[in-house]
Image (cartoon, rainbow, N blue to C red):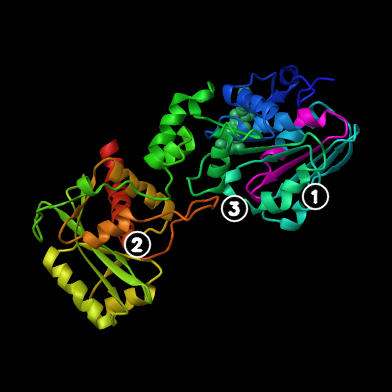
Amino acid sequence: MSDNFFKVPIHKLTDKLVIDRQEGIQLNASQLGMIEGMENNRFWVHISSRRTGKSLGAAILAFAKLLEPGSKVMVVAPNFTLSSIIWDYVTNIIANLQIECKKFNQKDKVVQLINGSEFRLLSANNRTSLVGRAAHLLIIDEAAVIPDDEYFQRDLRPALSTYPDSRALFISTPRGKGNYLYEYYMRGQDTEIVDWGSAKYPWTTNPLLRKADIEEAQRSMSKKLFAQEYLCDWSSSEAMIYNLDEEKHIIDLGIKEGDPRYTFFAGFDVGYRDDTAFVVIGTDGEKFYVVDEFYVNETPTSQLAEMIKEKIALWDIETIYIDSAAQQLKADFAYEYDIYCENAIKSVNDGILAIGSLIDNERLYFDEDKAQHSFKSVANYKWKASLETQKPIHDEFSHGSDAIRYGIYTYMRQTISVYGSYHAA
Ligand SMILES: Nc1ncnc2c1ncn2[C@@H]1O[C@H](COP(=O)(O)OP(=O)(O)OP(=O)(O)O)[C@@H](O)[C@H]1O
Ligand SMILES: [Mg+2]
């Protein structure tokens, strides 16, 4: 018998696999690297761009291992809803090749083959399901989505001690240097730590990825997110949402109050115990300028109304886009103070994309005298770490960022829906 970890010749196997109704697949550089990494390291950290065939590659390795009699293969996903992808791949391969199963439990996610091998899907957020098992091959998909490595250190690491040659494969795109997987990746890079290996594979390693799809991805995400998800950049995700540059984006705008060359509108985030943020934004139709602001805390409605009226008169503000959660205040303003606000569009991530794209394309500026707090808010706006869907952190910086997003994103959406189709025609 060979000394290889995988006893089954994988390239012969891939000739026979039917994927997307195509028989025989050619492994790409990332997938070949995954096999080599697994052969040469007990712990392999495989960092690879979106859509480079990570999950399929791992499924093929899982299947190859299962063909060895009596093998135990476990796949760990951050949670069941996010990822039964490898499970689906493996069970499809088994079904397509009409391999006989002793047990096939879709609900508990366990398959037993007649050669005595067993395949299991586990969820990192279900601790009791993790402990007390033994495995030859442990695969952790989307590993950086799991917040910390307790699931591995405490619960799963012992599973690898039962059999003499058992291995673990961590697969992921990066999630910033604060994530435990960065430490694992660095461990893999350290030649003195013999058991561990790691490598990263940007999108270019997959010849099947179309340039057009990549360009589309590039357009629809901020530079940082693209660098992380497609270029496998660890440092890019310091969890900062926007790429603001103090040298560039906060300047002396020199825009005078009510200058008729600009349309002025406002974004209004209403806090109760938190800050209330009111920002005034001017636009010439192309660029957006944060020209004025106030931030207050636990201020009575009457006083707030006074402050807003002052700003309306000063800048000739056309529309105030208010946090749609603040309906009572909106009504009070209208009935008692003659201040009319429009509900802001709430879709957080679309709004963030829009603002990020304005910043990256040099279409958003802050006044160095009058919009300092807003600049600071937007510059320090951060993603919550370690969630599978990214969400911003609610903190002292989020109120200004919300107010700016309410104002600009809603304004953009409204003007585009009114004029866009005519101009486009
Ligand atoms: N070597 C290959 N040859 C042909 N098609 C492939 C190959 N590897 C993967 N694919 C196909 O590419 C698509 C993406 O594969 P997969 O889901 O494994 O990628 P992934 O890197 O895990 O993606 P994600 O970043 O979305 O998790 C799937 O449709 C899969 O069938
Ligand atoms: Mg995947």
- Residue 74 lies in magenta, yes or no? yes
Name the kind of residue labelled 3 in the image.
Asp
Name the kind of residue labelled 1 in the image.
Asp
Q: Position of residue 218 (x, y in %)?
A: 40, 35
Q: Is any atom of residue 124 visible in this view?
A: no
Mark 2 and mark 1: span between their CA atoms?
A: 44 Å
Q: Position of residue 59 (x, y in %)?
A: 70, 33
Number of the label disc, if any, that sits on residue 397? 2
| Circle nearer the viewer, 2 or 3 | 3
Residue at 31% x, 53% y: name it: 379
Locate residue 246 relative to residue 238 in the image: left or right: left
Mark 1: give few (<14), some (14-19) or many (20+) Cα within 10 Å.
few
Dot 1: element: loop
Name the kind of residue labelled 2 in the image.
Phe
**Quadrant of residue 393 within the rendered picture:** bottom left
Give the mark nearest the N terminus, 2 or 3: 3
Locate residue 234 relative to residue 316 in the image: left or right: right
Q: Which residue is mark 1?
A: 108
Number of the label disc, if any, that sits on residue 148? 3
The relative height of residue 244 versus residue 54 in the rendered view (above or below) is: below
Mark 2 and mark 3: span between their CA atoms?
A: 25 Å
The relative height of residue 231 versus residue 358 in the rendered view (above or below) is: above
**Quadrant of residue 63 within the rendered picture:** top right
Mark 3 and mark 1: span between their CA atoms?
A: 25 Å
Ligand 2 picture quarter: top right
